[in-house]
Image (cartoon, grey):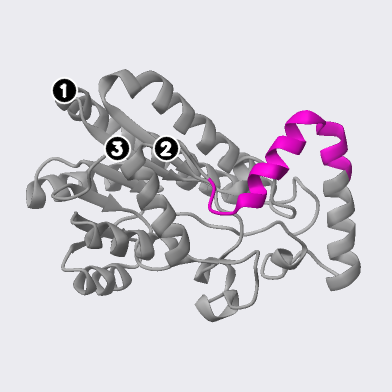
Amino acid sequence: MEIVGKTAIVTGGGSGIGAAIARQLAKAGAQVVVSDRNGDAAETVAAEISGSSFSCDVGREDEIKTLIQFAQTAHGPVDIFVSNAGLGRGEPDHAASASDADWDLNWRVHVMAHVWAARALLPDMIARKSGYFLNVASAAGLLNQIGDAAYSATKHAAVSFAESLAITHGADGIGVSVLCPQYVATPLIGMSDEDATGAPSLKTAEDVAQISIDAIKSDRFLVLSHPQVKQYTQARAVDHDQWITGMQALRSKVLDVFGEVDITKMHKFT
């Protein structure tokens, strides 16, 4: 899709990957609505790129509808929707130890937020024969995040829903990309760009954003900002049992070295 002159919404746009994508979309010529639960953070990014801001909790369908209505009133039909908002809480003990509330929150933010946005936008996009969804999932949606079953399961579902969008609506002129980054130096894992310096397995948010913009322009479905994820995914497909054994060994190594599963340190083993 050509980005110049398009209207785009970015959720979770107040920081990290979302803020970086908002900046890159504006640089490419889009009118951007920056959305975040933290309205002040969204407003700061929007002011930086001459965009608009809107406070939105993507875990609620009514708020996503209101966000889209705001964008349409301010800028006209929405051409690009970036479902980026996410969370990672980990688990207190075993793989099923996270509370029902945490599982429900992961489900609403990582899956239903994508569904609700599509539900609100698809009728008009289908009628116009034009539109684009960039759904941010994770390498965990293709592989697994050790220490956070709720995150991994819902990111897998996010990838699956993106596939359904692409399969069903490609003939309607609607593009879909699903971004599956591995470790990115963002506030979500307590890191900044400086932490990525000299750490080959860590990407900056700006690195990932540029790759995402290129994917939109070229209508590329699977967006892998970390090349090693393709290798891991292929190995998993060839021999799933061997991949499980390898992941078990990785978890044991992490526990031996750090004494706990700490997402801020996992990149050192990838």
Q: Is residue 244 on the magenta stretch?
A: yes
Identify the mark nearer the N-term, 3 or 2: 3
The quarter of the rendered structure image containing the N terminus is: top left
Q: Is mark 2 on a helix, strand or loop?
A: loop
Q: Residue at 38% of width from left, 35% of height from top? A: 176
The residue nearer to you, when weighing 204 against 245, is 204
Q: Which amino acid does label 3 sit on?
A: Tyr
Mark 2 or mark 1, earlier in chain: 1
Image mark for residue 132: 3
Disc 2: which residue: 220
Q: Could you classify mark 2 by the number of other residues whose Cα lies within 10 Å: few (under 14), some (14-19), or many (20 or more)?
A: some
Q: From the top left corner, tell me how far across and down residue 265 is, in percent.
A: 72, 70
Q: What stretch is highlighted in magenta?
A: 224-245
Residue in front for this viewpoint, 64 or 78: 78
Up-down relation of residue 81 to residue 193 (above or below): above
- Find out whether residue 231 is within the magenta segment: yes
Q: Give the residue pinned by disc 1.
A: 127
Q: Are marks 1 and 3 in contact (CB under 8 Å)?
A: no
